[in-house]
Image: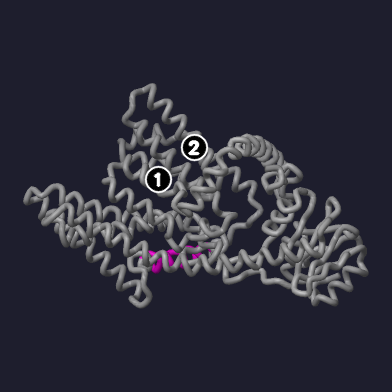
Amino acid sequence: MKRTQLGVLLDGADPGLHPATRVVERLAALTALKLGELLDVVAKPAGAVLEKLRTLGGHAARPGPLCVFALLRELGVPALAAALAGAPTLVFPWTDSVRLWATAGLNQIAVCLYLVAVTLGLRSLGASRARARALSRWALGLCIASMLTYPIAIVAVILTPLLYRLRASWGRAWRAGAPPAAAGGAALAYVSLATTKPSQPLEGQLRHAGTIAEEWLSLLAKAVLPIDGPPALAVLGAVAGGTAWGLVVAHRRAGRGETVSAGAVRAGVAMTWVGALAALAGYLVFVPGDAKYSPLAEGIYNRAGLLAAPAAAATALGVAILVSELALGRASRRGVAIATTLLAGTLLAGWSVRVRDDAARWDRAATRSREVLSVLDARLPTLAHGTTVYTVGHRRYEAPGVPVFSSSFDLDGAIKVRRGDASLAAYPLTGPLRCGVSSAAPAQPPYDRLERARYGRLYVLDVARRRALPIAGRADCQRARAGLGLGGGSG
């Protein structure tokens, strides 16, 4: 655990943070590190079992579907529909980076923790006073754990009273949901103060909101009909017309006493629209952020759909339920179940094709990253404490949004873990190299501040030519800069 980036937090918080938030970050890192050490002890005997599960089941061992299933069952959704709604989280292609990119894998745990928290909170609404108090404490604790795992959960935690409203009156929902909402508000205030990423100006946010809305509609159409060709508006128009007709049919069937069928049709309509609107809400939280975070973003940036993906998948499943009910609801409940399962399976198959293509790109990126590390090990087998390595001569991305080594944390984390030394640093050069009097740094902000290295314990590794250049002083830096074509910045 101490060899990971989590342990490295203790060696120095982000220098861009306010001094007060650096103190909080260090305390949080120490707590997380001690918890990680305990988990390491527990993980050793369980490692063989988990590896066997991974080998046998692959991604099927992930907890996301179970968390979705538990929440939907608590809300009264039939078992088949709840199971089918959970399964798509494994293969939904427009957020697959959280499964294909190891760095984002932990983000799924944040969502799962929140879903379990809401499940317990909903159950507390109908429990005895003592049991409700205990369940509420667990729900609050899991909400806090979710936000600590990934801050995207903060918005969902703040909106918890709205979910409780599905089970209770507004007053009861607010009283039960107020503690999580307050915790979410406090977390939002802290993140707003601590973040080093600026928000877009109002004009940029409005443009970003428009892009999100447009791509949200396209994503829903692709999710419902995962084939190329039909225009998005045509698909969504058919869905809107189908849901309107479904409400008419449900009213007629209820009038004839066919309450089960009428209720099932209404459930399909509700799942379609609630899922669509929840997906939009899940994307709109990124409006203040960079334009790269949008529903149809590629590679690592599609992790923006972490909250929205289950909702979008529910929309597609709602359409499958509605079609099955309208076609077979009056004839056979078993036929409806079979038809829904077949339609859901068809959706999963279509999504899986897209995920397969994405996985191939990620596999190629992983191969290239291992090649970079292999050259690093071969040319620099030993590194003195505190050494920094800049790498050039390799791809930063295999495909748009699919990194090999591209940022200030990925190669840096790899060398720390690989060498077991948190004092080492390694960064892919993202542009020109600036040669200062006593240190070198990338010319491009913010890397000029985050990746600065002093002469004497600095190397530039040319991966393509398999050579490492020691940088002992400014003259060495300037020679490397000229020889490797790293000009363009001052110095």
User: The magenta stretch spans which residues?
Assistant: 205-220
Q: What's under tag 2, amino acid-wise?
A: Leu
From the viewer's perspective, tell me whether residue 469 is left or right of residue 27. Answer: right
Which residue occupies the foreground of this view, 373 or 278? 373
Task: Report crowding for label 2: few under 14, some 14 to 19, many 20 or more residues within 10 A (C-alpha).
Answer: many
Give the residue drawn at x 14%, y 58%.
Answer: 249
Give the residue drawn at x 60%, y 46%.
Answer: 191
| Label 1 or label 2, whichever comes before in sequence order | 1
Give the residue drawn at x 70%, y 59%.
Answer: 411
Task: Report crowding for label 1: few under 14, some 14 to 19, many 20 or more residues within 10 A (C-alpha).
Answer: some
Display colour scheme:
one colour
Q: What's under tag 1, amino acid-wise?
A: Leu
Task: Say whether residue 206 is magenta.
Answer: yes
Asked if residue 431 can be seen in this view, the reply is yes
What is the residue that sits farthest to the left in this orientation?
256
Magenta span main SS: helix
What is the residue that sits farthest to the top in this orientation?
130
Determine whether 383 is above or below 34 in the image.
Answer: below
Which residue occupies the foreground of this view, 23 or 210? 23
Q: Which residue is mark 2?
A: 142
Q: Which residue is mark 1?
A: 66
Indicate the quadrant where residue 341 lies: bottom left
Find numbered disc 2 in the image and state the secondary structure of the residue it sits on. helix
